[in-house]
Amino acid sequence: MIAVEPKPTKEVCAEFRFHAAKVEPLRQQVQQVAGMAQLFKALADDTRLQLVYALSQEELCGCDLSVLLGISQAAVSHHLRTLRQLRLVTSRREGKVVYYTLADAHVEAIIAQGLAHWKE
């Protein structure tokens, strides 16, 4: 058996130069988006995205959403819980019926921008 000597590797980090004038000012700005992936993870699910889109058009109750999407009320409730935890959706009670709507105009803008991009 022939012994193979490992090839000498060049130390990349020793020669690596970065543009400090560009990187340092961005460091804090980049850290502002930490955790925002949860928002996009929630919207990455087709059912949740359809719920958010429907609510961007109209305030709807859980029953309406269930019929609209063709899924059970339990499934709607599960998805709405996730959306409420991320403060994307808000609710109000009218007697026994709970109505849902988007939490604010920012959420509507995210959906509108995403849809405009998707249609291009």
Image: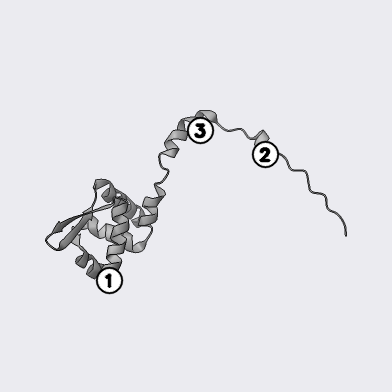
Instruction: Note whether residue 58 is visible.
Output: no
Marking on residue 72 = 1
Rendered location of residue 4, percent (x, y): 83, 53
Q: Amino acid at mark 2?
A: Val
Q: Secondary structure at mark 1?
A: loop
Is 63 placed left or right of 44 in the picture?
A: left
Marking on residue 23 = 3
Q: Secondary structure at mark 2?
A: helix
Question: Do the residues bearing badges 3 and 2 touch, measured as CB atoms within 8 Å?
Answer: no
Question: Do the residues bearing badges 2 and 1 touch, measured as CB atoms within 8 Å?
Answer: no
**Pointer 2 residue:** 12
Rendered location of residue 34, percent (x, y): 42, 43
Rendered location of residue 89, percent (x, y): 26, 53
Of callouts 3 and 2, the N-terminal one: 2
- Residue placed most toward the observer, 68 or 39: 39
Residue sitting farthest toward the top: 21
Real-space Cα separation, disc 2 to disc 1, in angstroms: 55 Å
Of callouts 2 and 1, the N-terminal one: 2
Q: Tell me the quarter of the picture where residue 20 sits.
A: top right
Of callouts 1 and 3, the N-terminal one: 3
Rendered location of residue 110, percent (x, y): 31, 49
- Residue placed most toward the observer, 118 or 108: 108
Task: Tell us which disc is closer to us: 1 or 3.
Answer: 1
Task: Tell us which disc is closer to us: 2 or 1.
Answer: 1
Real-space Cα separation, disc 1 to disc 3, in angstroms: 49 Å
Q: Residue at x 74, y 43 (%)?
A: 9
Residue sitting farthest toward the front: 96
Real-space Cα separation, disc 3 to disc 2, in angstroms: 19 Å
Q: Amino acid at mark 1?
A: Ser
